[in-house]
Image: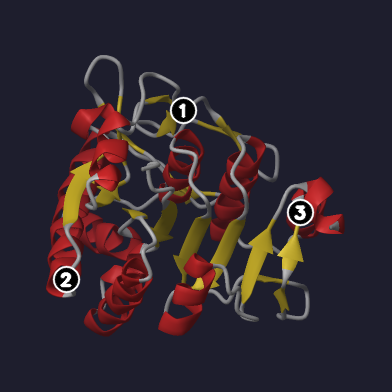
Amino acid sequence: MSAPVPIVVKLGGELVENPERLNTVVVAMARVAKQGQALVIVHGAGKEIDAALSAAGIDRRQVDGLRITDDRTLDVVVAVLGAVNTRLVAALAAEGLAAVGLTGADGRCGPAEQAPPHRTVDGRLVDLGRVGIPSEQGEPRLVSVLVENAFVPVIACIGIGSDGGLFNVNADTFAAHLSARIKARRLVIAGTTPGVLDEAGATISTIDAPAVARLIQAGTATSGMIAKLRACEAALARGAGDVVIVDGRDGRALEGAALGAIPETATRMVAFEQIRT
C-alpha cells in the first residue's frame, strides 16, 4: 500500500483563539479526515502572543508581517504557542481525530537558521532577532511516520537550530516549507480574509507570481498578506502542486479548499505556467 499523500493546513492564530471559530475549524478538519484525506496542521497564535507580550510589558514590534523577536519575546512566543497547541489538539481529539501536538523541535521536524536582516518593502534593512527561516537540515521523518500511521500532526511554528536554539518562525513560511519537504498534495492557508483581494476588495480567484509582485508594488497587499504571498511563492517554487488561501471562518469553504472544491471566496495560487491551463 502506498503512503498517504497529506495536505498541509495552516491555521492563523485568529482562528484558534476564539471558541466559536475553533469549533468551526475542527469540525471542518474532521469532515476532511473522514473523506480519507491525510492532514498535517500548522498553526500560529498572533493575537494571543500580542496580549501576552503586553501583559509582560514587552513592546510588540513587527515589519512586513514578521515579528521582531528578542530573547524575552521568544520566551513568550514559545509559551503561548505551547498553550494554543494543546488546546487545538484537545479540540481535534474531541472530534475524533488522532491529533498529536508538536513543535518544530520535536524530531527536528522544523529545522531553522537565523534569518538574515529583512529588506522591507520600502527598502530598509531590519534585524529580526530570534526569527528563523526554515533550513534543509535532516528530513521531517517524524511527520511522515505519524501521517502513515493515521495520526494528525499539529505543529506550532517554532524552529530549532543546529545548536538546539529555538527560533520564532513565521507560520505561513513554516507551513510552506514543510509542505514542500513532505511533498504535500496542497497547502491551504486559512485566516480571516476571503482569499487575496484586488484593488476593489474583490477576491482574486487565481493568481501567479507576477501578479503577486504587482499587488505588492501597488501597495494593495497588506503587510500580513505579503508574508503569506511570499510563503506561497516559496512553496510553489519548491514543487507544491498548488496553494489555496481561504477564509477559515467559513467551515464549508475551508473543507472545500482542502478537498479541491475551491470556493469562490478563496484564491488559488499557481505557478506561472499553470495559470494558462
* Total labels drawn: 3
- Residue depicted at 32% across the width and 81% down the height: 24
Which quadrant, please, contains the N terminus? top left
Secondary structure of the residue carrying tag 1 is: loop
Q: Single out the mark in the foreground, 1 or 2.
A: 2
Give the mark, 2 or 3, whose residue is nearer the N terminus.
2
- Mark 1: which amino acid? Ala
Secondary structure of the residue carrying tag 2 is: loop
Q: Which numbered tag is attached to residue 195?
A: none
- Residue depicted at 30% across the width and 16% down the height: 162
Q: Nearer the viewer, residue 119 or 189?
A: 189
Which quadrant, please, contains the C terminus? bottom right
Give the mark, 3 or 1, whose residue is nearer the N terminus.
1
Residue 206's place in the image compared with 95, above or below, is: above
Secondary structure of the residue carrying tag 3 is: loop
- Residue depicted at 81% across the width and 56% down the height: 275
Q: CA distance from mark 2 to mark 3?
A: 37 Å
- Mark 3: which amino acid? Asp
Tell me whether the residue at label 1 lies in contact with that at label 2, contact meaning CB atoms closer than 8 angstroms: no
Q: Which numbered tag is attached to residue 96?
A: 2
Q: What residue did someone put label 3 on?
A: 208
Q: CA distance from mark 3 to mark 1?
A: 26 Å
- Mark 2: which amino acid? Gly
Whole-percent x and y of residue 12?
39, 63
